[in-house]
Amino acid sequence: MRLATWNVNSIRTRVARTVEFAVREDIDVLAMQEVKCKPEQFPYAPFEDAGYHVEVHGLNQWNGVAIASREPMTDVRTGFDGMPGFAKATATAPVHIGTDAPLEARALGAIVNGVRVWSLYVPNGRSLADPHLDYKLQWLDALRAATAAEIAATPDLPLALVGDFNIIPFDHDNGDPDIVVGRSTHVSPEERAAFFALESAGVQDVVRPILPEGYTYWDYQRLKFPRNEGIRIDFVLGSAAFADKVSGAAIHRNERKGEQPSDHVPVVVDLDLGAAEEDDDLPMIFA
DNA sequence: ATGGCTAAAAGATTTAGA
């Protein structure tokens, strides 16, 4: 099975190149982030014409996550247990963060080919002084707890957290001189600690051992891509049962090129799920 | 020229992204 994650930055703007990529790269499961639309606005037809089922979680023009899959999806979930919401300050009320605040469309889970996939769009944080950074940290801590609980409940079910984590784990993942430790989000000790705390929940970065270097995002502004001033913020974090099956990985830097690219590129992982999943593709000469 | 952004809703700017 070939699994990809891609922050598409509006699926309506980029549906053609998104589906073209999925078909060309033989993607079985494509987790998308920032689809920026409601389900009724989602361009299902191009995906379905290419042989994909689609699940969408979108509430408005912001955020929005989706999964396209060649095989049907089961146990589809919007949001994870304990996921907080965010309400910005108004004239009469302060900022509110919690499970009783309005939930955003940042997490969509489904089981496909016997693998639990979570398509995740972690809150940005905005700036070090912004309450949105507190929201980001609380959201990540709730994700850590929910992931630990899910792995404890079903340790043999391969699980992957995939998506835009909005954290630059290591200094060598940051090629953007405008992002500075001490001044910027994405590189703060607190955000990095929240990212690495996911390891304690039982998931690990399955792309890093194969591709130690490589950016996944370049800002549209100030010639960041031509200058290769990118950052690495999109990841595939797999449980032990998932990581055992990883046989390859790729970061598709070329998808940042061309007409109307997303500012992110796809990250792809190959899984060896054994003979069962290959039955569709191989002649039954061993039957 | 030594620098240049993109997207959506509702406008003719605001909010958001990272």
Image: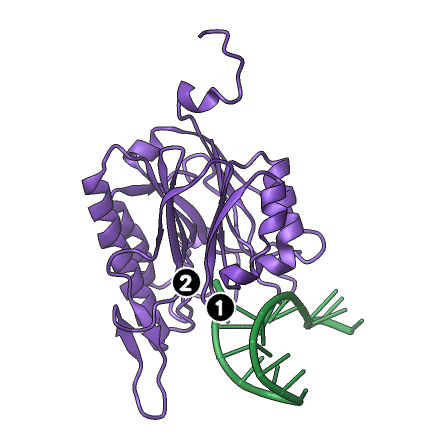
Chain colours: A purple, B green
Label 2 vs label 1: CA separation?
8 Å
Q: Residue at x 25, y 59 (%)?
A: A142
x 19%, y 41%: residue: A153
Task: Say which residue label 2 marks.
Answer: A105
In the rendered image, which quarter is residue A182 located in? Answer: bottom left
- A55 shown above or below A181: above
Of helix, strand and loop, which one carries label 1?
loop
Residue B15 position within the rendered picture, expressed as x and y whole percent measured from the top left: 49, 79
Q: Nearer the viewer, residue A189 or A216?
A: A216
Q: Position of residue A34 (x, y in %)?
A: 50, 60
| Sooner in the amino-acid sequence: mark 2 or mark 1 | 1
Q: Residues within 10 Å of mark 2 (few under 14, many from 20)?
A: many
Evaluate if marks 2 and 1 touch, with contact meaning CB atoms under 8 Å apart: yes
Give the quadrant of the C terminus of chain A: top left
Q: Which residue is mark 1?
A: A62
Q: What's the residue at 36%, 73% (across, down)?
A: A132
> In the shown orientation, is residue A94 left or right of residue A54?
left
